[in-house]
Amino acid sequence: MTQSHRHERWGVLGGGILGMTLAHRLRQQGKDVTLFEAAETLGGLASTWQLGDIIWDRHYHVTLFSDLYLRALLAELELEKELNWVETKTGFFTDGTFYSMSNTWEFLRFPPLRLPDKLRLALTIFYASRIRNWGRLEGIPVAEWLRKWSGTRTFNKIWLPLLRSKLGESYKITSAAFIWATIARMYAARRSGLKKEMFGYVHGGYARILDRFESTLAEEGVAIRVRHSAKRVESIEGKGLGVTFENGREEIFDRVVLTVPAPVARRLCVELDKDEALRLEKSQYQGIICASLLLDRPLSKFYVTNLTDSWVPFTAVIEMSALVDRQHFGGKALVYLPKYVSPEDPTFSLSDEEIRETFFSALSRMYPQFSPSSVLSFRVSRVKHVFALSTLNRSGQLPSVVTSIPGVYMVNSAQIVNGTLNVNETVQLAENSVKQILLASNRLDAVSFSATPQPLPVFT
């Protein structure tokens, strides 16, 4: 199938952090790698855009002290030393009132919950942070587990609104492993040496990181092709793997790695066997509609404001300028208003103006000092497949990295079972998957040149 092990041509489809990291590692192993991205720039969910006169992340991202995989990658890019660590404040908007929840004293004073409720909430978080065998949580619905440990009142007042804000009604089919992973990541930062909740960012945001990463890939010899949306991946007898793009271009590779969401991978690879196709189809995703606002003044002191009032049309308020020094924004304030929804949600069909009107109306009710005239720039990002849901017993339903199509591999968030989607998890997924890919590729070479046909091992 291949000319030689040394001169294999590899195509990586999807130029987000996942695809970039895989291309980076494959090139370090001497592979001839071409990286394809459908958009105009690399980065995927970590990509950047312009708001007024600033360039910053299209979606909100932070680095935790415990994000060791991401920090190791940043160290390779000579950017880890430029991380700025900041202690942030967290707020809750409940029953039309703002409350600070940034320390133990504020937690104990939190009026919406009675003292027994607070103790059970604290116990839930502490207990979850101590669990090591997360697998046993996979078969327990997250709502059932949280009600058991926190009580019905705390669940209805705190947990249910937060679950709906991230998962919508899909929380009903989500396992308790989801909340474990969320709590474990936050607690890991404290175990890593910091006693306070600290968030980090690189000067210039992901624009700086992506620019350095792209330059590194180019210097290594990775060919980069943007504006290349894949249409089909198929075996071509005697030639290898053919990749057809929407722009009409066709390329032949010895190996192809897809980092696109599971539903997209299912559409591209019609040769997959029935079990693989079913696993991809069963991967349920959450999407996001995220508005970015550049303001002439801050809204609050909180980096994150959690929302429990159901009338608010977005699911949180993320004030990036409460974390990042406002000098990076020319003295202005940067706010994100995310709304997590299913890929089929009708909100995706709303225009920017309709979203603007709805979101601004809610901001005016929440923040009396807010005025639409203070908004200097407003943009909306829409992504239908952001992360795969941690559904019940998910680990037994994962799509395989090594597919039934010889030489075709798949890596995406549907394979994350004991974590929540963030850049660190993405880098970790790439690092772990590339080992499976290289091992399978080497075995495929052995099969190709063996006189006796042998079965291709499939890793799960």
Image (cartoon, rainbow, N blue to C red):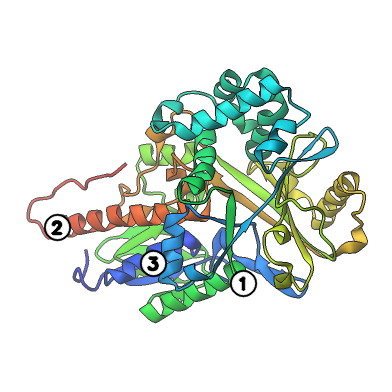
Q: Earlier in the sequence, mark 3 or mark 2?
A: 3
At label 3, which amino acid type do we have? Ala
| Classed neighbour count for the residue bearing mark 3: other residues with Cα under 10 Å, few (<14), some (14–19), many (≥20) | many
- CA gap between label 1 and label 3 equals 24 Å
225 lies left or right of 84 = left
Vertical relation: 265 (above or below) 213: above
Instruction: Check disc 1 and give the amino acid type.
Output: Gly
The CA span between labels 1 and 2 is: 46 Å
Residue 408's x, y, as percent? 33, 55
The residue that mark 3 highlights is: 23
The extreme left residue here reads 451
Q: Nearer the viewer, mark 1 or mark 2?
A: 1
Number of the label disc, if any, that sits on residue 204? 1
Q: Percent x, y for residue 338?
A: 70, 49
The residue indicated by pointer 2 is 446
Say if mark 3 contacts mark 2, CB within 8 Å: no
Which label belongs to residue 70? Answer: none
Q: CA distance from mark 3 to mark 2?
A: 23 Å
User: Residue 214: percent from the left, percent from the top?
Assistant: 48, 74
Tell me which label, 1 or 3, sits earlier in the chain: 3
